[in-house]
Protein backbone atom coordinates (compact mmCIF):
# COMPACT_ATOMS: atom_id res chain seq x y z
CA UNK A 1 0.00 0.00 0.00
CA UNK A 2 1.47 3.31 -1.09
CA UNK A 3 1.07 6.65 0.68
CA UNK A 4 0.45 9.76 -1.39
CA UNK A 5 0.42 13.46 -0.67
CA UNK A 6 -2.99 14.07 -2.17
CA UNK A 7 -6.20 15.81 -1.12
CA UNK A 8 -9.11 13.45 -0.48
CA UNK A 9 -11.09 15.79 -2.74
CA UNK A 10 -9.24 14.14 -5.64
CA UNK A 11 -10.48 10.68 -4.64
CA UNK A 12 -12.01 8.33 -5.68
CA UNK A 13 -10.43 8.54 -9.13
CA UNK A 14 -10.65 6.14 -12.08
CA UNK A 15 -7.12 5.53 -13.40
CA UNK A 16 -7.50 2.95 -16.15
CA UNK A 17 -9.67 0.20 -17.57
CA UNK A 18 -11.23 -1.19 -20.73
CA UNK A 19 -14.75 -1.74 -21.99
CA UNK A 20 -18.04 0.08 -21.53
CA UNK A 21 -19.57 -1.97 -18.72
CA UNK A 22 -22.91 -3.78 -18.52
CA UNK A 23 -26.19 -2.96 -20.24
CA UNK A 24 -29.07 -3.43 -17.84
CA UNK A 25 -32.11 -5.59 -18.61
CA UNK A 26 -30.55 -7.39 -21.62
CA UNK A 27 -30.42 -10.71 -19.79
CA UNK A 28 -27.00 -10.95 -18.17
CA UNK A 29 -23.74 -11.85 -19.95
CA UNK A 30 -25.46 -13.95 -22.65
CA UNK A 31 -27.91 -11.17 -23.37
CA UNK A 32 -25.07 -8.66 -23.54
CA UNK A 33 -23.36 -10.78 -26.23
CA UNK A 34 -26.59 -10.80 -28.26
CA UNK A 35 -26.95 -7.03 -27.80
CA UNK A 36 -23.37 -6.31 -28.94
CA UNK A 37 -23.79 -8.62 -31.94
CA UNK A 38 -27.05 -6.93 -32.94
CA UNK A 39 -25.49 -3.44 -32.68
CA UNK A 40 -22.55 -4.53 -34.85
CA UNK A 41 -24.96 -5.84 -37.51
CA UNK A 42 -26.94 -2.58 -37.42
CA UNK A 43 -29.92 -4.28 -35.77
CA UNK A 44 -29.80 -2.30 -32.54
CA UNK A 45 -33.43 -1.23 -32.98
CA UNK A 46 -34.38 -4.65 -31.53
CA UNK A 47 -33.30 -3.23 -28.18
CA UNK A 48 -34.75 0.26 -28.66
CA UNK A 49 -37.33 -0.33 -25.89
CA UNK A 50 -34.46 -0.37 -23.37
CA UNK A 51 -33.29 3.08 -24.44
CA UNK A 52 -36.58 4.97 -24.55
CA UNK A 53 -35.80 8.68 -24.29
CA UNK A 54 -32.07 7.93 -24.69
CA UNK A 55 -31.98 6.80 -28.31
CA UNK A 56 -28.73 8.69 -28.96
CA UNK A 57 -26.91 6.26 -26.62
CA UNK A 58 -28.02 3.30 -28.73
CA UNK A 59 -27.05 5.03 -31.97
CA UNK A 60 -23.52 5.77 -30.74
CA UNK A 61 -23.01 2.67 -28.61
CA UNK A 62 -19.48 1.25 -28.47
CA UNK A 63 -18.86 -1.72 -26.12
CA UNK A 64 -15.10 -1.10 -26.26
CA UNK A 65 -15.36 2.49 -25.03
CA UNK A 66 -14.70 3.30 -21.37
CA UNK A 67 -15.86 6.73 -20.27
CA UNK A 68 -12.94 7.62 -17.98
CA UNK A 69 -13.09 11.30 -18.86
CA UNK A 70 -16.86 11.27 -18.44
CA UNK A 71 -16.90 9.38 -15.13
CA UNK A 72 -14.26 11.19 -13.05
CA UNK A 73 -15.91 14.65 -13.01
CA UNK A 74 -19.11 13.23 -11.49
CA UNK A 75 -17.74 10.22 -9.57
CA UNK A 76 -18.50 11.61 -6.09
CA UNK A 77 -21.95 12.85 -7.04
CA UNK A 78 -22.87 9.46 -8.49
CA UNK A 79 -21.71 7.75 -5.28
CA UNK A 80 -23.91 10.14 -3.24
CA UNK A 81 -26.84 9.33 -5.52
CA UNK A 82 -26.39 5.58 -5.02
CA UNK A 83 -25.98 6.09 -1.26
CA UNK A 84 -29.24 8.04 -1.10
CA UNK A 85 -31.09 5.28 -2.95
CA UNK A 86 -29.73 2.34 -0.94
CA UNK A 87 -29.52 3.93 2.52
CA UNK A 88 -32.35 6.47 2.54
CA UNK A 89 -34.70 5.07 -0.09
CA UNK A 90 -34.82 8.18 -2.27
CA UNK A 91 -32.39 10.34 -4.27
CA UNK A 92 -32.13 14.10 -3.94
CA UNK A 93 -31.85 14.57 -7.71
CA UNK A 94 -32.74 12.42 -10.74
CA UNK A 95 -29.78 10.38 -12.01
CA UNK A 96 -29.82 12.17 -15.35
CA UNK A 97 -29.06 15.46 -13.52
CA UNK A 98 -26.12 14.10 -11.52
CA UNK A 99 -22.94 15.81 -12.59
CA UNK A 100 -24.79 18.41 -14.62
CA UNK A 101 -24.30 22.03 -13.67
CA UNK A 102 -27.58 23.58 -12.65
CA UNK A 103 -28.50 26.57 -14.76
CA UNK A 104 -30.36 29.54 -13.31
CA UNK A 105 -34.06 29.39 -14.09
CA UNK A 106 -37.21 31.29 -13.20
CA UNK A 107 -38.64 30.21 -9.85
CA UNK A 108 -41.37 31.47 -7.55
CA UNK A 109 -39.53 32.77 -4.50
CA UNK A 110 -41.17 33.67 -1.20
CA UNK A 111 -39.74 36.47 0.95
CA UNK A 112 -40.82 35.80 4.53
CA UNK A 113 -40.39 37.71 7.79
CA UNK A 114 -40.29 35.59 10.94
CA UNK A 115 -39.95 36.56 14.59
CA UNK A 116 -40.05 34.94 18.02
CA UNK A 117 -43.38 35.72 19.65
CA UNK A 118 -43.70 37.46 23.04
CA UNK A 119 -40.02 38.30 23.44
CA UNK A 120 -38.17 41.61 23.55
CA UNK A 121 -35.80 42.75 22.16
CA UNK A 122 -37.20 41.30 18.95
CA UNK A 123 -35.48 38.24 17.47
CA UNK A 124 -36.31 38.10 13.78
CA UNK A 125 -35.22 36.84 10.37
CA UNK A 126 -36.00 37.94 6.83
CA UNK A 127 -35.31 35.18 4.33
CA UNK A 128 -36.06 33.90 0.84
CA UNK A 129 -37.02 30.37 -0.13
CA UNK A 130 -38.39 28.61 -3.26
CA UNK A 131 -42.13 28.07 -3.03
CA UNK A 132 -41.81 24.46 -4.23
CA UNK A 133 -40.07 23.41 -1.02
CA UNK A 134 -42.29 21.47 1.38
CA UNK A 135 -43.92 22.87 4.51
CA UNK A 136 -41.71 20.49 6.50
CA UNK A 137 -38.55 21.94 4.92
CA UNK A 138 -39.74 25.43 5.87
CA UNK A 139 -39.86 24.08 9.42
CA UNK A 140 -36.29 22.78 9.24
CA UNK A 141 -35.11 26.16 7.91
CA UNK A 142 -36.81 28.00 10.77
CA UNK A 143 -35.29 25.62 13.30
CA UNK A 144 -31.81 26.26 11.89
CA UNK A 145 -32.30 30.04 11.75
CA UNK A 146 -33.63 30.23 15.33
CA UNK A 147 -31.11 27.78 16.88
CA UNK A 148 -33.54 24.90 17.42
CA UNK A 149 -32.17 21.36 17.46
CA UNK A 150 -33.90 18.36 15.79
CA UNK A 151 -35.05 16.71 19.00
CA UNK A 152 -38.58 18.05 19.59
CA UNK A 153 -41.92 17.89 17.81
CA UNK A 154 -43.08 20.83 15.74
CA UNK A 155 -46.04 21.90 13.66
CA UNK A 156 -47.45 24.82 11.70
CA UNK A 157 -50.74 26.49 12.50
CA UNK A 158 -52.40 27.92 9.41
CA UNK A 159 -55.13 30.16 10.80
CA UNK A 160 -57.44 32.42 8.82
CA UNK A 161 -58.28 35.47 10.94
CA UNK A 162 -61.13 37.97 10.55
CA UNK A 163 -58.56 40.44 9.22
CA UNK A 164 -57.73 37.95 6.45
CA UNK A 165 -61.43 37.42 5.73
CA UNK A 166 -62.14 41.15 5.56
CA UNK A 167 -59.23 41.64 3.17
CA UNK A 168 -60.61 38.85 0.99
CA UNK A 169 -64.17 40.22 1.11
CA UNK A 170 -62.93 43.61 -0.09
CA UNK A 171 -61.98 41.90 -3.34
CA UNK A 172 -65.29 40.15 -4.06
CA UNK A 173 -68.56 41.44 -5.46
CA UNK A 174 -71.10 42.99 -3.06
CA UNK A 175 -73.75 40.33 -3.75
CA UNK A 176 -71.33 37.64 -2.54
CA UNK A 177 -70.43 39.34 0.73
CA UNK A 178 -73.75 38.50 2.41
CA UNK A 179 -73.19 34.82 1.63
CA UNK A 180 -69.67 34.67 3.11
CA UNK A 181 -69.25 35.13 6.83
CA UNK A 182 -66.60 32.55 7.76
CA UNK A 183 -63.82 30.61 5.98
CA UNK A 184 -66.04 27.52 6.22
CA UNK A 185 -68.52 29.24 3.87
CA UNK A 186 -65.77 29.04 1.26
CA UNK A 187 -65.10 25.38 2.08
CA UNK A 188 -61.89 26.32 3.96
CA UNK A 189 -61.00 25.31 7.51
CA UNK A 190 -60.22 28.33 9.70
CA UNK A 191 -57.54 26.35 11.56
CA UNK A 192 -55.29 23.72 9.98
CA UNK A 193 -52.24 22.06 11.54
CA UNK A 194 -49.33 20.77 9.45
CA UNK A 195 -47.30 18.20 11.40
CA UNK A 196 -44.30 15.98 10.76
CA UNK A 197 -44.06 12.39 11.95
CA UNK A 198 -41.30 9.85 11.34
CA UNK A 199 -42.38 6.68 9.46
CA UNK A 200 -44.51 4.23 11.50
CA UNK A 201 -44.72 6.72 14.39
CA UNK A 202 -48.06 6.93 16.22
CA UNK A 203 -46.87 9.38 18.89
CA UNK A 204 -49.23 12.13 17.73
CA UNK A 205 -52.34 10.00 17.28
CA UNK A 206 -54.04 10.94 20.57
CA UNK A 207 -53.44 14.68 20.16
CA UNK A 208 -54.01 15.18 16.44
CA UNK A 209 -57.05 17.08 15.32
CA UNK A 210 -59.14 15.58 12.56
CA UNK A 211 -57.94 16.83 9.20
CA UNK A 212 -54.35 17.61 10.24
CA UNK A 213 -51.96 17.41 7.29
CA UNK A 214 -48.49 15.96 6.95
CA UNK A 215 -46.10 18.85 6.37
CA UNK A 216 -43.77 16.87 4.09
CA UNK A 217 -46.63 16.24 1.62
CA UNK A 218 -47.49 19.89 0.92
CA UNK A 219 -45.60 22.76 -0.67
CA UNK A 220 -44.97 25.72 1.62
CA UNK A 221 -47.40 27.84 -0.37
CA UNK A 222 -50.11 25.78 1.38
CA UNK A 223 -49.26 27.22 4.77
CA UNK A 224 -48.60 30.77 3.52
CA UNK A 225 -51.72 31.07 1.33
CA UNK A 226 -53.26 33.83 3.44
CA UNK A 227 -49.96 35.55 4.14
CA UNK A 228 -49.30 34.43 7.71
CA UNK A 229 -48.84 31.36 9.87
CA UNK A 230 -47.39 30.26 13.21
CA UNK A 231 -44.60 27.76 13.71
CA UNK A 232 -44.77 25.88 17.03
CA UNK A 233 -41.72 24.04 18.38
CA UNK A 234 -41.20 21.95 21.54
CA UNK A 235 -44.70 21.73 22.97
CA UNK A 236 -43.26 21.61 26.50
CA UNK A 237 -41.42 24.94 26.30
CA UNK A 238 -43.98 26.28 23.83
CA UNK A 239 -41.83 28.30 21.42
CA UNK A 240 -43.80 30.13 18.72
CA UNK A 241 -42.45 31.81 15.58
CA UNK A 242 -44.77 34.18 13.70
CA UNK A 243 -44.47 34.13 9.90
CA UNK A 244 -45.52 36.98 7.62
CA UNK A 245 -45.32 36.74 3.85
CA UNK A 246 -43.77 39.89 2.41
CA UNK A 247 -43.98 39.02 -1.28
CA UNK A 248 -43.90 36.30 -3.94
CA UNK A 249 -41.67 37.03 -6.93
CA UNK A 250 -40.60 35.21 -10.06
CA UNK A 251 -36.81 35.29 -9.91
CA UNK A 252 -34.21 34.10 -12.39
CA UNK A 253 -31.94 32.50 -9.84
CA UNK A 254 -30.12 29.22 -9.28
CA UNK A 255 -31.75 27.15 -6.53
CA UNK A 256 -28.25 26.70 -5.08
CA UNK A 257 -28.56 30.27 -3.81
CA UNK A 258 -31.71 29.46 -1.82
CA UNK A 259 -32.77 29.42 0.93
CA UNK A 260 -30.90 32.46 2.19
CA UNK A 261 -31.15 34.83 5.14
CA UNK A 262 -31.35 38.47 4.05
CA UNK A 263 -31.41 40.17 7.44
CA UNK A 264 -32.24 39.71 11.09
CA UNK A 265 -31.40 40.44 14.70
CA UNK A 266 -30.84 38.39 17.82
CA UNK A 267 -29.27 35.00 18.48
CA UNK A 268 -32.35 32.78 18.60
CA UNK A 269 -33.71 30.56 21.37
CA UNK A 270 -31.83 28.65 24.06
CA UNK A 271 -33.15 25.10 24.06
CA UNK A 272 -34.64 23.57 27.24
CA UNK A 273 -34.51 26.90 29.09
CA UNK A 274 -38.26 26.94 29.69
CA UNK A 275 -39.75 28.86 26.79
CA UNK A 276 -39.95 32.65 26.49
CA UNK A 277 -40.20 33.22 30.26
CA UNK A 278 -37.16 31.04 30.86
CA UNK A 279 -35.26 32.85 28.11
CA UNK A 280 -36.02 36.22 29.72
CA UNK A 281 -34.74 34.88 33.04
CA UNK A 282 -31.62 33.48 31.33
CA UNK A 283 -30.81 36.75 29.53
CA UNK A 284 -31.29 38.76 32.73
CA UNK A 285 -29.00 36.42 34.70
CA UNK A 286 -26.26 36.46 32.05
CA UNK A 287 -26.42 40.25 31.81
CA UNK A 288 -26.13 40.53 35.60
CA UNK A 289 -23.19 38.10 35.65
CA UNK A 290 -23.68 36.99 39.23
CA UNK A 291 -26.26 35.54 41.60
CA UNK A 292 -27.88 32.14 42.07
CA UNK A 293 -29.58 32.07 38.66
CA UNK A 294 -26.35 32.98 36.89
CA UNK A 295 -24.40 30.26 38.70
CA UNK A 296 -27.07 27.69 37.85
CA UNK A 297 -27.02 28.63 34.17
CA UNK A 298 -23.22 28.70 34.18
CA UNK A 299 -23.09 25.19 35.66
CA UNK A 300 -25.61 24.01 33.05
CA UNK A 301 -23.53 25.45 30.19
CA UNK A 302 -20.36 23.83 31.55
CA UNK A 303 -22.12 20.45 31.66
CA UNK A 304 -22.85 20.94 27.95
CA UNK A 305 -19.20 21.79 27.28
CA UNK A 306 -19.97 25.46 26.64
CA UNK A 307 -18.68 28.68 28.18
CA UNK A 308 -21.44 31.07 29.20
CA UNK A 309 -18.94 33.95 28.93
CA UNK A 310 -18.93 33.44 25.13
CA UNK A 311 -22.70 33.75 24.86
CA UNK A 312 -24.10 36.87 23.18
CA UNK A 313 -27.88 37.05 22.87
CA UNK A 314 -27.68 39.99 20.46
CA UNK A 315 -25.40 38.24 17.96
CA UNK A 316 -26.71 37.09 14.57
CA UNK A 317 -24.15 35.92 12.02
CA UNK A 318 -25.92 36.01 8.65
CA UNK A 319 -23.06 34.31 6.75
CA UNK A 320 -22.92 31.49 9.29
CA UNK A 321 -26.69 30.98 9.16
CA UNK A 322 -26.60 30.76 5.36
CA UNK A 323 -23.77 28.22 5.61
CA UNK A 324 -25.83 26.18 8.08
CA UNK A 325 -28.95 26.31 5.89
CA UNK A 326 -26.94 24.73 3.07
CA UNK A 327 -25.56 21.97 5.29
CA UNK A 328 -28.25 21.13 7.84
CA UNK A 329 -31.68 21.07 6.15
CA UNK A 330 -30.92 17.56 4.87
CA UNK A 331 -29.79 16.44 8.34
CA UNK A 332 -33.03 17.67 9.92
CA UNK A 333 -35.11 16.05 7.17
CA UNK A 334 -33.44 12.69 7.80
CA UNK A 335 -34.20 12.97 11.53
CA UNK A 336 -37.88 13.80 11.15
CA UNK A 337 -38.92 12.06 7.95
CA UNK A 338 -36.68 8.98 7.96
CA UNK A 339 -36.21 8.56 11.73
CA UNK A 340 -32.41 8.55 11.35
CA UNK A 341 -30.06 9.69 14.09
CA UNK A 342 -27.55 12.40 13.10
CA UNK A 343 -23.98 11.22 12.52
CA UNK A 344 -21.15 12.56 14.67
CA UNK A 345 -20.17 14.85 11.79
CA UNK A 346 -23.73 16.23 11.66
CA UNK A 347 -23.84 16.73 15.42
CA UNK A 348 -20.53 18.62 15.25
CA UNK A 349 -22.09 20.87 12.59
CA UNK A 350 -25.18 21.50 14.71
CA UNK A 351 -22.99 22.33 17.73
CA UNK A 352 -20.69 24.57 15.62
CA UNK A 353 -17.56 22.55 16.36
CA UNK A 354 -16.18 23.98 13.10
CA UNK A 355 -15.76 27.33 14.86
CA UNK A 356 -13.45 25.95 17.55
Image: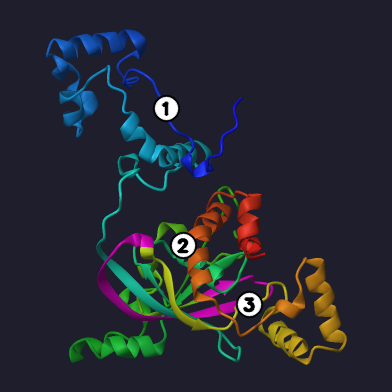
Residue 191, numbered circle: none
Q: Disc 2 or disc 1, which is closer to the eye?
A: 1
Element under label 1?
Answer: loop
Provide the residue span drawn in magenta: 231-256
Residue furthest out toward the right: 292
Write down the quadrant of residue 90 in the picture: top left
Question: Which residue sits at x=35%, y=20%?
Answer: 21
Distance of label 3 from label 2 (alpha carbons): 19 Å
Q: Position of residue 270 (x, y in %)?
A: 67, 76
Write down the residue under mark 3.
269
The answer to whether 337 is drawn above or below residue 148 in the figure is above
Residue 137, numbered circle: 2
Which one is in front, 20 or 258?
20
In which quadrant is the C terminus drawn? Answer: bottom right
The answer to whether 23 is drawn above or below residue 107 in the figure is above
Question: Which residue sits at x=80%, y=88%?
Answer: 289
Task: Report the side of 189 relative to 288 (left or right).
Answer: left
On the question of residue 203 being in view, the answer is no
Residue 245 colored in magenta in the image: yes
Write down the quadrant of residue 173 in the picture: bottom left
Distance of label 1 from label 3 (alpha carbons): 50 Å
Write down the quadrant of residue 146 in the picture: bottom right
Q: Position of residue 282 (x, y in %)?
A: 74, 84
Write down the residue under mark 1.
15
Mark 2 nearby-residue class (10 Å; few <14, some 14–19, many ≥20): many
Residue 240 colored in magenta in the image: yes
Amino acid sequence: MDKFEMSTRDLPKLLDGAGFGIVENVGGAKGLKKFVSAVKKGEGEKFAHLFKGREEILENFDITKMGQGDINPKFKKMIKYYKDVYEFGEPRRPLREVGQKKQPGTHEVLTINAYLKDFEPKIWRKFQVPQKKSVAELGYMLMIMFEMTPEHEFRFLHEITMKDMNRFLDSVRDEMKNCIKTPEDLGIKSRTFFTVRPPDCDYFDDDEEEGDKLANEYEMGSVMTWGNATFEYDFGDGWEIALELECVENMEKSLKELPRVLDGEGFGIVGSVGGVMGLEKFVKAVKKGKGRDFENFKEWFEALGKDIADFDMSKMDKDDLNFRLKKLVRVYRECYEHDLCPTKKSIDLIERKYMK
